[in-house]
Amino acid sequence: MRHSKTTILAFVFICAFITRANAQKFEIHPYAGGFFSGKVAGLLDVKNQPLYGIKGGMFANNNFQIEGNIGYINNLAFVGTLTRKHGYIWEGLATYNLSKFYGSYGLGAVTTSVSADSTDFFGTAIPTRDTFLSMSYGGGFKVLRKWGPLGYRLDARGRTLPNYNGFTYSWFEATAGLTIAWGDR
């Protein structure tokens, strides 16, 4: 009887330690990947481009996480035009974690700014800055604290701009990067 109590007590202690070791409070995720565009209004192609950014988040409980995302797309212009637009993604996300897999929904904006060479060429004929409502939805796979505080994260998501210059515009994003985790929940 004493041996089984000791075994159960040791098992509970080990489980509590493992949970505590993997239960971080904060997370930062620098990432890089690709932006794979569809056609705007079924007519105009947008160039596929690399996508860079950083996400940061905080766990509200064991599964629910609140995140912020700032991303950058070098050229968000239509194919065949001389205009070059930089895209800046900024949003807040609600993420639900299930072990290593997660799903998230984000709401924010995509701000575009026309590059200096385009404004030199076109002058004031084109708007230099626009902001569009953005909704993102997707999920992925993450491994936390694989190498000390470092882990990795793979993310696939769709993004929809309901009114991009008068049209609904959606695209696919695939990103990957390191995850840095710290703090106790």
Image (cartoon, rainbow, N blue to C red):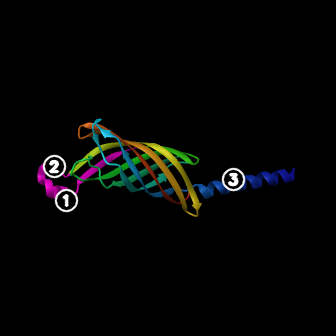
Which labelled disc corresponds to residue 15?
Answer: 3
Q: Amino acid at mark 1?
A: Asp
Which labelled disc corresponds to residue 167?
Answer: none
Residue on which the image places disc 2 = 126
Q: Earlier in the sequence, mark 1 or mark 3?
A: 3
Contact (Cβ within 8 Å) of mark 2 with mark 1 = no
Q: Nearer the viewer, residue 113 or 3?
A: 113
Q: Which residues are magenta?
A: 106-128
Q: Is residue 117 above or below residue 174?
A: below
Pick the quarter of the image with the C terminus.
bottom right
Contact (Cβ within 8 Å) of mark 2 with mark 3 = no
Identity of the residue drawn at 19% across and 59% down? 117
Q: Tell me where residue 158 appears, x and y as whole percent.
A: 41, 42
Asked whether the viewer can see residue 161, the reply is no
Helix or strand or loop: what does disc 1 sit on? helix
Q: Nearer the viewer, residue 39 or 146?
A: 39
Q: Earlier in the sequence, mark 2 or mark 1?
A: 1
Residue on which the image places disc 1 = 117
Q: Nearer the viewer, residue 96 or 167?
A: 167
Asked whether the viewer can see residue 14, the reply is yes
Q: Tell me where residue 57 appears, x and y as whole percent.
A: 46, 53
Q: Tell me where residue 86 appears, x and y as whole percent.
A: 28, 54
Which residue occupies the extreme bottom position in the image? Answer: 148
Which residue occupies the extreme front position in the image? Answer: 80
Distance CA(mark 2)–CA(mark 3): 61 Å
Residue 123 image-quadrant placement: bottom left
Q: Nearer the viewer, mark 1 or mark 3?
A: 1
Q: Amino acid at mark 3?
A: Cys
Q: Tell me where residue 150 appears, x and y as whole percent.
A: 54, 62
